[in-house]
Image (cartoon, rainbow, N blue to C red):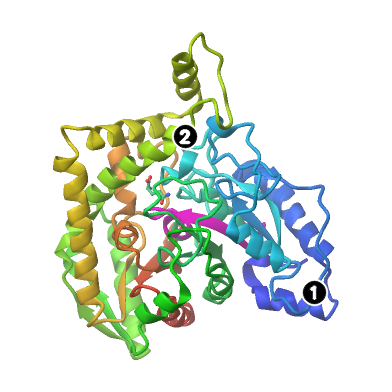
C-alpha cells in the first residue's frame, strides 16, 4: 500500500499515469489509514465516505489526489463549522475559491478536519468536538489551530491538507507534527469562502510532507481572485517579488534567546544554521526591535477583528438558533450556548479595545506598531533574503500542560510578526528530539517572494 508520508504528489501522479494505482486506490488508502489511526488521533470531524470520485486526467498534477480540508473552508453543499457549536447545522452554499481551484484540478476532499474553534488557539484543545492528538505521541497536542490538518498529514491519512494561518495556525501545528506548513503572503491566496476570523491577517495555505508539494500547491492556490477585495493582482505581486536574491539569512538572535524558549530547540536551530552555512548560506545577525511588541499588537488587533467578525453569528442568519422571548434573548442565548470560552474571551477583549474611550489608546496604537514592524522588515529584507528562527518556542506539550491563555499565546511568538506584516513564511521539519518529537525551522521571505522559501526549504530538507 502507498505511504503518503514518503510519496510526493508528483510521484502519485506518475503512479496514476502509469496505471499502477487508481483514484479509488488512493481514496481507499486514505480511508484505511483513517480507520486504522483516527479513532485515537481524532483529526477528522467528518469523512466523506460515500462520494463520486473524479476520473483521472493526466493533464493535471492534482487529478485524483485526495486531501483533507480544515473545517473553516467552504465546499458547496458540505458542512463547515469552524469546529464551533454555533455553526453546527451550517452547510456551505458556495465553494471557496481554493475549493474551486482544487476541484477544478481534479483533487477531492476525503473529509473535513478538526481545529481550534473559529481558528483561535494553538493546541486544538479549543475545538467544540474534543481535541486532536499528535500522531508522534498521543499524550501531546498537535498544535493549532490547524491541528487536524497537520495530524492528518503526519499520520499519512492524506497526501496534503488545507489550513489557515492568522498568527501561526499553519506553521505551528506543522512544526509540532513534523510536516511542512506554508503561510503564503497575505493577499496571494484568496480568502473567499474562508470563515473569517481576523480578516486583515487570515490566509489559507497548504500542509504537506515536502517543500516540493507546498510549492506545487501554492502555484495553484495563488490564482488571482477579483471576488476577494484583499486579493492582490498578479501585476502588483510581480512588482514586490524579490527578483535578485542570494543566500543571505538574517537571524534575530536577541529576539530568539529569551526566557521560555526550550534549550533543545535553540540547539537544533543553531545546528541547522551550521549545516546551511556548509551549503553556502551566509548567516548574519539582524535586529528587529519591533518584534518584541508583535504578540501584544496581535492580541489587540486580532480580538478587535474577531469581535466584529463574530457579530454575524446572531442566531438569525447562520447556524445555531436558541429560542428566546425577545430578539435580544435569542442573540444572548445563542451566543452563550454556541461559543466556547476562548472565543468569548476574544470577543470581550476586542469589544473593549474598540470601545469609545479606548480605541485611541489600544487599537490605533497597535496599528502604529504594525506599521513599524512592516517598515523594519522591509528594511531588513533589503539586506537579507530570508529570516530564520525556530517555528515555536516549545516541543509538542502534553494535554492540559499549558492552561493559562498567556502561555498558549506565547506559542506564536516567532510566527505572529509575519502575519502582521503579511510576509510569507514556511515551517520545515529539522530533526527529532531525544524523546522522538519533531523540531522545526521557520523561514520568512520578502512579500510575494515564496520562491525564495521553496529554494532554501529544499536545501533544509537535503541537509537536515
Ligand atoms: N494562536 C493564535 C490565536 O490563537 C493564532 C491562531 C491562528 O493563526 N488562526 O489566535
| Position above or below: 72 against 21 | above
Judge from the rendering whether residue 259 lies leftward or rightward of residue 450; answer left or right: left
Q: Is residue 464 visible?
A: no
Asked whether 157 falls inside the magenta stretch, the response is: yes
Residue at image point 48% right, 11% down: 326
Q: Is residue 36 visible?
A: yes
4 relative to 308, above or below: below
Q: Residue at horizontal 59%, vertical 59%?
A: 97
Residue pictured at 27% horizontal, 56% vertical? 261
Q: Please identify, in this view, whether the residue under mark 2 or under mark 1 is nearer the observer.
A: 2
Name the quadrant of the C terminus: bottom left
Q: Nearer the viewer, residue 71 or 193?
A: 193
Label 1 CB sits under 8 Å from any ligand 1 atom:
no
Instruction: Pick whichever, 240 or 412, lies toward us.
Output: 240
Q: Residue at x 73, y 57 (%)?
A: 30
Q: Are marks 2 and 1 in contact (CB under 8 Å)?
A: no
Mark 1 closeness class: few <14, some 14–19, many ≥20 residues within 10 Å: some
* Range covered by the magenta-colored residues: 155-174
Mark 1 = which residue? 57
Residue 299 location (% of width, % of height):
28, 44
Q: Which mark is residue 166?
A: none
Q: Is residue 432 above or below residue 72?
A: below
Query: Can you identify the residue that label 2 sits on?
Result: 312
Amino acid at each position: 500500500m502507498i505511504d503518503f508520508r514518503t510519496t510526493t504528489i508528483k510521484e502519485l501522479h506518475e503512479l496514476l499515469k502509469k496505471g499502477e494505482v487508481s483514484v479509488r486506490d488512493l481514496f481507499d488508502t486514505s480511508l484505511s489509514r483513517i480507520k486504522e489511526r483516527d479513532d485515537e488521533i481524532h483529526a477528522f470531524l467528518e469523512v466523506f465516505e460515500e462520494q463520486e470520485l473524479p476520473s483521472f486526467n493526466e493533464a493535471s498534477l492534482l487529478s485524483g489526489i485526495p486531501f483533507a480540508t480544515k473545517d473553516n473552508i467552504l465546499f458547496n453543499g458540505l458542512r463547515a463549522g469552524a469546529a464551533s457549536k454555533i455553526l453546527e447545522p451550517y452547510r456551505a452554499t458556495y465553494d471557496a475559491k481554493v475549493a474551486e481551484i482544487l476541484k477544478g484540478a481534479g483533487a477531492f476532499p476525503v473529509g473535513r478536519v478538526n481545529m481550534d474553534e473559529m481558528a483561535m488557539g494553538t493546541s486544538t484543545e479549543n475545538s467544540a468536538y474534543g481535541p486532536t492528538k499528535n500522531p508522534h505521541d498521543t499524550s501531546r497536542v498537535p498544535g493549532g489551530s490547524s491541528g487536524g490538518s497537520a495530524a492528518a498529514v503526519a499520520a499519512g491519512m492524506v497526501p496534503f491538507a488545507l489550513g489557515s494561518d492568522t498568527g501561526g495556525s499553519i506553521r505551528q501545528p506543522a512544526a509540532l507534527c513534523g510536516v511542512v506548513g506554508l503561510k503564503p503572503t497575505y493577499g496571494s491566496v484568496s480568502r473567499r469562502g474562508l470563515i473569517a476570523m481576523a480578516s486583515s491577517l487570515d490566509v489559507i495555505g497548504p500542509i504537506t510532507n515536502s517543500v516540493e508539494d507546498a510549492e506545487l500547491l501554492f502555484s495553484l492556490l495563488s490564482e488571482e481572485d477579483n471576488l476577494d477585495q484583499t486579493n492582490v493582482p498578479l501585476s502588483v505581486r510581480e512588482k514586490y517579488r524579490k527578483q535578485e536574491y542570494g543566500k543571505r539569512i538574517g537571524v534575530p538572535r536577541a529576539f530568539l534567546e529569551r526566557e521560555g524558549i526550550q534549550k533543545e530547540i535553540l540547539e537544533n536551530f543553531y545546528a541547522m544554521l551550521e549545516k546551511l552555512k556548509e551549503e553556502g548560506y551566509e548567516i548574519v545577525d539582524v535586529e528587529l526591535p519591533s518584534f518584541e511588541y508583535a504578540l501584544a499588537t496581535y492580541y489587540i488587533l486580532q480580538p478587535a477583528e474577531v469581535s466584529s467578525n463574530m457579530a454575524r453569528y446572531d442566531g438569525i442568519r447562520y447556524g445555531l438558533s436558541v429560542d428566546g422571548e425577545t430578539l435580544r434573548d435569542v442573540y444572548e442565548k445563542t451566543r452563550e450556548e454556541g461559543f466556547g470560552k476562548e472565543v468569548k474571551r476574544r470577543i470581550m477583549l476586542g469589544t473593549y479595545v474598540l470601545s469609545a474611550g479606548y480605541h485611541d489608546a489600544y487599537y490605533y496604537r497597535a496599528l502604529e506598531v504594525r506599521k513599524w514592524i512592516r517598515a523594519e522588515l522591509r528594511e531588513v529584507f533589503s539586506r537579507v533574503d530570508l529570516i530564520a528562527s525556530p517555528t515555536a518556542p516549545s516541543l509538542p506539550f502534553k494535554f492540559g500542560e499549558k492552561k493559562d491563555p498567556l502561555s498558549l499565546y506565547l506559542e506564536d511568538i516567532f510566527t505572529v510578526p509575519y502575519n502582521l506584516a503579511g510576509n510569507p513564511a514556511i515551517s520545515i521539519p529539522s530533526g527529532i528530539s531525544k524523546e522522538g518529537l519533531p523540531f522545526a525551522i521557520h523561514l520568512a521571505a520578502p512579500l510575494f517572494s515564496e520562491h525564495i522559501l521553496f529554494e532554501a526549504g529544499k536545501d533544509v530538507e537535503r541537509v537536515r
